Amino acid sequence: MEKQVLFETKGIGKTYGTNTVLQDIDMQIYPGEIIGLIGENGAGKSTLLKIISGVERASAGNMYINSQQYIGGSPVIANNMGIGMVFQEQSLIRNLTVAQNIFLGKEYQYRHIGIVNWSKMEHDAKAVLEEIGINNIKPSELVMNLSFAARQMVEIAKIFNIVSKSPGKSIILLDEPTSVLNDAEIKQLFEQIRKIVSQGNSVVFVSHRLDEVMEISDRIYIFKDGKQVGMMEKKDANEAILYEKMVGRNTTGEYYKVNKQTVPDMDKELLKVENLSKFGVFKDISFSLHAGEVLGICGVEGSGKEELCDILVGEDHATSGEIFVKGQNINIKNQSIALNNGILSIPKERRTQGMIGTLSVKENMMLSSLNKISKFGILPKSSQDEVAKKWIDTLAIKTNGANEMMLHLSGGNAQKVVFARAINSEAEILILNHPTRGVDIGSKEEIYDLIRTITNKGMAVILLGDTLDESIGISSKIIALKDGLISGIFDCSAD
């Protein structure tokens, strides 16, 4: 007996002016299954999800739910039909409680003669959370006090609560839900996903981490340049095949470019940290960083690694200890002082901290090097165009041009622009806070190659890797932090 199709697209396409971003997409989703969706940045994955969820309208093709035509057109219509999307950039209101976010816009259900029954709302929110296996988040907690992972769980609970009110089975669209989660949090998320589909609902899961896609998905659709280039059953998939279909070439086998690893110049110390401490966070951290070196700092959330890097780049202040740049004791009070001393960071939250969405690609690339290229306060247009073209070509940034606004770029391509800004600053010390987060596998190779290039030129890198494998593969040396203390130092040099 042939399985019933829950949702289907036929010939879906999307154009923006003369730019075609999706073309002839045919996809089927069956009840109770998990669809993996993969492709390089700009391949069209997020655009398809936005069309299905009603955020965007298709330019061509048709969609069907239970064999009935579905037009979409707004998230409300999609929600009423049982379709909901959890976006990569979270949409919760941080100064409201978990319960208030889950029932946002539904407060009337708890209002009587102008008074809201908060206790009843929190009781119902607890039931919603427990329905998909979340038992460790208090409905009364302010969202701003939750970790990113916990906020992700609340977002899923909120969407599931909305779409589960529809008459049929639901479809949850997850766009890069694991990008900032650790292994334990990913395991918890996967348990929730499996619980959702065990009830006959379906999930579309987008991730650049191919191992995750293969672990959680029943079937995998592969996109390239806005087209669907393949569909594979889980049993037939492996990373090499998926990589080749996504990127259009075989993996080189030298993923981390270890053969290009620079031997650090031990006679040229760029940075020295002595007994640096932040009360209640980390204590007595000491290390040196040399020209050509990649220093990986590893540790779980709460180990102190993020806060340590915040101090080095001037976003926070140490309680005690000293920082030396090229032998000079520097009090890094702010980011401007850090940059003037050759220290710059690529932040983890690129959308809120690493870019200005309403400026162009070109203007964002110039943000950290204005003093170097300006003449009497004026930026020569020719210099801007030259720099922008160089980095667009070098990093294979998919954009309609250097004048396109950043907010129109996909997450991975926006990350590449942020990376270009940092390198273009000519800072000698780059702090890379998860530089490949949200970036596809082909682009990761390009970034790894770029790290090798800049260290070969004598720059030094402090790396907070996306995974332990990445940190080991890229770093010359690794410092392991545990509970704010150095628990070990490991040599990772190629020889």
Image (cartoon, rainbow, N blue to C red):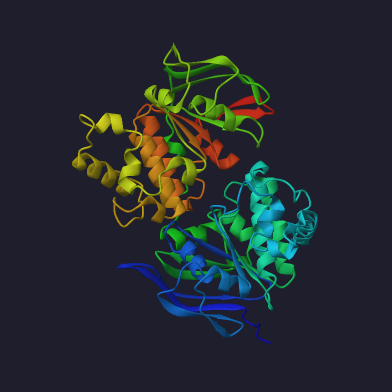
Residue 200, given in percent of the width and then of the height, sits at 71, 73
Q: How many marks?
A: 0
| Left/right of residue 201 with respect to residue 294 in the rendered view | right
Q: In this image, 493 relative to 113: left or right? A: left
Q: Quadrant of residue 404?
A: bottom left
In the rendered image, residue 415, in percent from the top left (x then y), is placed at: 44, 46
Q: Is residue 371 visible?
A: yes
**Residue at (44, 64) in percent of width and height:** 44
Q: Give the residue furthest to the top.
A: 328
Instruction: Kindly give the residue lying farthest to the bottom in the view shown.
Output: 1
Location of residue 322 in the rendering, given as x and y in whole percent from the top left corner: 53, 14
At a point 67% along the width and 64% down the height, the residue shown is 106
Is 448 in front, or is 345?
345
Residue 428 position, x and y percent, is: 38, 26
Q: Which corner quadrant holds the N terminus?
A: bottom right
Q: Is residue 34 above or below residue 253?
A: below
Res 494 seen here: no
Instruction: Name the residue located 55 percent from the left edge and 37 percent from the top edge.
Output: 471
Q: Residue at x 23, y 45 (%)?
A: 385
**66 above or below 174?**
below
